[in-house]
Amino acid sequence: MTSRIPRDSRLRLVRPRTLAAAPRAMTQRPVRRPAPRPPEGTPAPAELARMARAELAGAA
């Protein structure tokens, strides 16, 4: 016959987080690093956009 006494599961070994701590974790954002610089000799973004439009004009 099985016992009717509830047994502790392994999940109870982890302490539950308080409700006050949960929203704080969602509002904190990781520190973002700036984007790396493009390699030397890369055209300016406006020039790259112009080149892309010229290449893709036939596809549209």
Image (cartoon, helix red, strand yellow):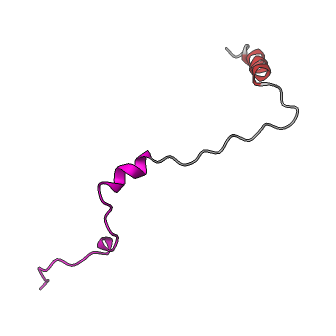
- Residue at 60% x, 44% y is 32
Name the one closer to the observer, 30 or 54. 30
Q: Is residue 10 magenta?
A: yes
Residue that sits furthest to the right in the current view: 41
Q: Quadrant of the N terminus?
A: bottom left
Position above or below: 13 against 41: below
Residue 30 in percent (x, y) is at: 54, 49
Classify residue 19 as left or right of residue 58: left
- Residue at 21% x, 79% y is 7
Q: Quadrant of the C terminus?
A: top right
Residue range in magenta is 1-27
Classify residue 42 as left or right of residue 52: right
Q: Is residue 43 magenta?
A: no
Q: How many marks?
A: 0
**Residue 56 quadrant:** top right
Position above or below: 40 against 25: above
Position above or below: 54 against 27: above
Residue 39 in percent (x, y) is at: 83, 38
- Residue at 31% x, 54% y is 20
Residue 15 in percent (x, y) is at: 32, 69
Name the one closer to the observer, 25 or 3. 25
**Residue 19 quadrant:** bottom left
**Residue 54 quadrant:** top right
Classify residue 23 as left or right of residue 44: left
- Residue at 14% x, 83% y is 2
